[in-house]
Amino acid sequence: MADSVLMTILEQVQMEIQGLNLLGIDADSVHIVKVFTDTEELLPTLPGVLVGPADGESVPQGGGTNSRVDVGYPVAIGIFAADGDSQSDDFDRNLLWRERIRSKFVDQRLAGAPSVYTCRFEPREIVDRKRWLSRGLWSSSFGLRFLSREPRV
């Protein structure tokens, strides 16, 4: 079990995605990463999902209490699959992966991370056209921001 709130969130997100049993994505193809770099190095088998920190934390103005502070932890989700040049092959399946992952977390508490009281969706490209056109790689990403109420030190 992690000590930091962010690592606890990342590990829980990984486990929750693995538990979705997404058609075609094995549980061992869902990885936590420090930094998104070349997808092929991080995901030796496709399809797969990468989970990692994104941007910086946020501390909403007026959030929290005298003894607790609200912190928003950003998590990036990247979904990847080998893809050909067809505009329709596997498109619906891939979109369903994105939809199921998003709906698992948005506006929900996070089991295993008791300080997290909700999650916000931060949209990004549904399909990365450059990767699809140049490499035949279906790549989709979005952000999740987990809001956590933590004791002040």
Image: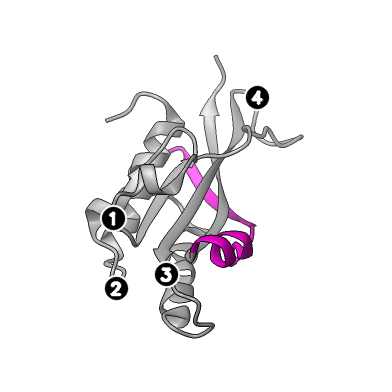
Q: Amino acid at mark 4?
A: Asn
- Label 1 vs 3, first from the N-terminus: 1
Residue range of the region highlighted in magenta in the rendering: 113-135
Circle on res. 53: none
Circle on res. 66: 4
- Closer mark to the observer between disc 4 and disc 1: 1
Secondary structure at numbered mark 4: loop
Query: CB atoms at circles 2 and 1 under 8 Å apart?
Result: no
The front one of 140 and 10 is: 140
- Label 2 vs 4, first from the N-terminus: 2
Residue found at x 56% / y 62%: 134
The residues bearing labels 3 and 4 have C-alpha atoms spaced at a distance of 41 Å
The residues bearing labels 2 and 1 have C-alpha atoms spaced at a distance of 15 Å
- Label 3 vs 4, first from the N-terminus: 4
Secondary structure at numbered mark 3: helix
Quick check: 29 above or below 6?
Answer: below
Say which residue label 1 marks: 45
Say which residue label 2 marks: 23
The residues bearing labels 2 and 4 have C-alpha atoms spaced at a distance of 46 Å
Q: Amino acid at mark 3?
A: Trp
The question of residue 20 being in magenta is answered with: no
- Label 3 vs 2, first from the N-terminus: 2
Mark 2 nearby-residue class (10 Å; few <14, some 14–19, many ≥20)? few
Secondary structure at numbered mark 2: loop
Q: Quadrant of the N terminus?
A: top left
**Picture quadrant of residue 46:** bottom left
Q: Amino acid at mark 2?
A: Leu
Q: Residue furthest bottom?
A: 88
Quick check: 28 above or below 34?
Answer: below
Mark 1 nearby-residue class (10 Å; few <14, some 14–19, many ≥20)? some
